[in-house]
Each structure stands twice: as structure tokens, then as C-alpha cells.
Amino acid sequence: MTLLPSPVNSQQLEKVKKLGPVFSRLMDRVSCDVGWLMKHLAPLRLPDACDPWTAQLLDLAEEIYGKGAIAKDPKADAGRLFLMRQDYLPDRDGKYKQVEINTIAVALAGLTEPLARVHGYLLGTCSAKLPESIRSAGEQMQDNAPGRAYAQALASAHLMYIKSTAQDCQARDRCSGPQVCFYCFPQDHLETDQRLIEVELRKLGVESFFAYLGADVELKGGDSARAGVGGTCIIDGIEASVVYFNCTYKPEHFANPKEWQNRKLMELSHAIKAPTLLGHLAGLKKVQEILSAKDALDRFLSPEEVEGCLSVFARQVDPSNTDSESIVAAAKCEPENWVLKPQREGGANNFFGEELKRLLCEGGSSLSQYVLMERIKSQPMPCLLMKKAGVVEQQDVCSELGLFSAYLACGNEEIQNNVGGAMLRTKQFRSEEGGVCAGHGAIDTPLVVS
């Protein structure tokens, strides 16, 4: 962690906060447009793309939501829930550019508020010992409690589910009735982060439980002619009102056929998913590359919203597309100015420098699994990093801003769409990756400066 909060420009922060609900709405609309989503992700299903895991996710989505025997309506569940983080880096000119949107298993929402309190305490108690430049620099972000915002969204989704199944739930008490399921993997190093959200959820009177990869998942009831679609989701013997995915975002989470079957049963069910499989796919790097073009955004957003989104996009292309040949050539010549992204979450997956150049030079259709994105070049700033208890080092760093957003909808109605707070992932300036969970960054909070 950092010993003190790091500066974030107030105007840039307000700009991206206003865009937060727009990007949340965009992800929901993309996830509900099954034909458009499957069409644009179709190249990832081809053997030449060399990404069998993503292809299998797409096959499952096609089986459930396509035009086959099941043909589930993406708006058929009790609701649709996104608990997202929208990540930004300041470019050379100080303006924020979007790095990515995370739609599944977002980390650090629960830990942000406690860290902000620690930072506030240190700013207050140590102010006399701090340089004037820090004491007068700015103030902490107000109401920075994304864990609470996530819990509120989970609670609202839970109540929506209860109302949608009211006749079945009338005789149940709070503990024996449906509960929110935190679906995780064993020995998750982020369990504390998840437990803090669980605590906030309990304060709202909503019971929850943790289940893990390999859990016993059943689908009860539903339309038997369509593989049980719309049935009740039972996980380890408990009815799940909401399945909050903190796993299933990488191939290692699907180690055997049972994990694929569990994911299918959850998706078929009436339970609210955070996110649905379609919502997971909407957050793929490939989709974000496609949405960086104005004509794609025009399909989903108003002209004013499109203009706002385009203003924070960095240049990104499909390196396998012949239209991208000049950009690929530029990346080969100056690989330090580009990053090559696969369709993966969890950090430490991107390619830089000579490795990026090697992959581009190899060429071929396998490049379709990647997105080639222009690197955002932040300016270094000094920071006090605490890598372990009692050991503090001053280093040059750059900070990636993560906005936590919660979005809940039912049918065509938005129920909740807000930004609940923000954190920073601060890394050594020369480090290419910045993921905290992958060991490349430190957790940090914003100090808002003019």
C-alpha cells in the first residue's frame, strides 16, 4: 500500500465520474444485444485464433442465448447486475485515457474505504511532519465507499429476486430463504476484500454465503423443454437469489467438465448474475476495441454520450486486420509505445517491448485473439510505498485510477446506476504491469487536487 493518498486532478476525476454511468449503461446494452455481440466475437471461436477457452465461453453463450432450442432472453431474469471497475491512466498531457472496463470479479472495492480511513488518519496525525506541498495539495475524495455501494446493489438485486418469486418465498424466513452467493475460488487472497462487502450486505439485512469452484449446483424447475431455463439455482443446498462471480474469469477456473456444467446451470437459472455470461463477454478486450470506433458506439448511445466516450479512448486495433497494417508496422518499429492484450483478466497477461514485437512479426491469424493498444504514457511522481510492515521507500510512481460502478436493471428499466467510489493502483514508474493482485502495484486512494 501507499503511506499517503496520491494526487488526482479534480477536473479529470469529475469528467470520468460523469462518464461512469454511461459506460455502465453501454456494457448492459451490449450484453443484451446478443446478435451484435456474437457476430463481433465470432473470430475468437475459430481454431486459428488459438484461444480455445474464450471459444468455449462463446459456444456456451450461443447454446443458451442463441437461436437454438433454449433461446433464453437476456432480459428474462429477475434483473441484470454489473459490479464494474473502469480503469484510467493520465496521459502525458494529464488527461485521463481509459485502460479497460472490468465487468467480472472486480477486486478491492471492499478494501478501498478502510484504506481511505487509514490515509485520512495519517494525513491528520502526521500533517505537521509533512511537506507543505502535501499538506495543502488537496483533500480526500468524499463518500469513497465502493464496498457499501456494491452491497447496496446486491441487496437491491436480492429484493428484486424475492419479489419475482414472491409466491414461493412467502413461508420462508430470512435464513432459510434465498441468499446472495459469493462464488469464489478456494484460498482466494482477496477473501478479506469480499468479506468486507459481505459485512455491509448483512448490515442491510441480507443473508449471504460463500461457495467455491467445485460446488454442488442444481437447477430446479424451469422449462423442461428448454434445458430448465428459468429454474431455481441451488448451490450447496442453498437457493441463490444473486450469484456474485469472484471467479470463472480465467481458464484455470474451468479445470474439469463439472465447472462448465455449473456455469451453464447458473446461467440457465432465474437467479440474478453479477455478471451474466453475456456481461462477462461484453467486458472482453476485443469488445472494447470494437467500441472504440464511433459507428459502433452510435448503435448504443446518444451523440453526446458517444462524444464523451471517444474523448477518453486510446487508439486500439485488431492487429490481424489488414486495415491495421500501418499501425502494426509502427508498433514493430517502436514497441515501447504499444501494448498487446489477450482476452484475459487477473493481471500480468499483456505483452510489451521485444515480446510484443516478436508476436507481431510472427503474424498470422492467431493475432486475432489480441488487441493492439497505444500505451498511455503517464508522468512520474514521488510516492511513499510500504511493501511490508515498517518498511517505507520513496519511489517514482504512476497511478491508475479505478472507478467502481454499480448498475442494476430489470427489463428495460434502470434501477441503479452510480459510481460508488474510486481507488488507485500505484506502481513503480518503470513497471509495465500495474495489477495489485499480480504483485505489480500497491493499493492507494485519491487525493483530489485542482
Image (cartoon, helix red, strand yellow):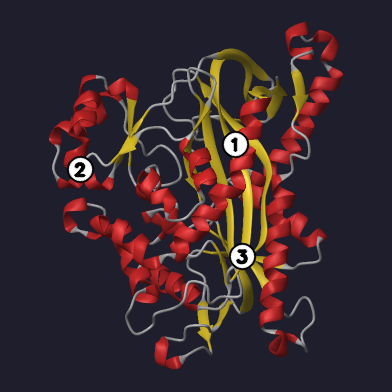
SS class of the residue under badge 3? strand
Q: Which mark is residue 16?
A: 1
Label 1 close to label 2 by CB (< 8 Å):
no
Label 3 Cα neighbours within 10 Å, binned few <14 / some 14-19 / many ≥20: many
Q: In this view, does 151 lie to the left or right of 428?
A: right
Name the image quarter holding the N terminus: top right
Residue labelled with disc 3: 409
Is residue 188 visible in the rendered structure shown here? no
Q: Which residue is drawn at 64% across and 31% down?
A: 13
Q: Position of residue 365 (x, y in %)?
A: 16, 47
Q: In this view, does 154 lie above or below 225?
A: above
Q: Which residue is drawn at 70% across and 19% down?
A: 450
Q: Position of residue 166 (x, y in %)?
A: 72, 85
C-alpha span from label 1 to label 3:
22 Å
C-alpha span from label 1 to label 2:
30 Å
Residue labelled with disc 2: 321
Label 1 Cα neighbours within 10 Å, binned few <14 / some 14-19 / many ≥20: many
> In the displayed image of the protein, which residue is found farthest to the front?
303
The part of the image, by quadrant, that contains residue 316 is top left
SS class of the residue under badge 2? loop
The part of the image, by quadrant, that contains residue 392 is top right
Is residue 28 visible in the rendered structure shown here? yes
Q: Where is residue 135 in the image (x, y as percent from the top left)?
A: 79, 13
Q: Which residue is drawn at 71% across and 57% down?
A: 151
Looking at the rendered structure, the kind of residue marked 1 is Val
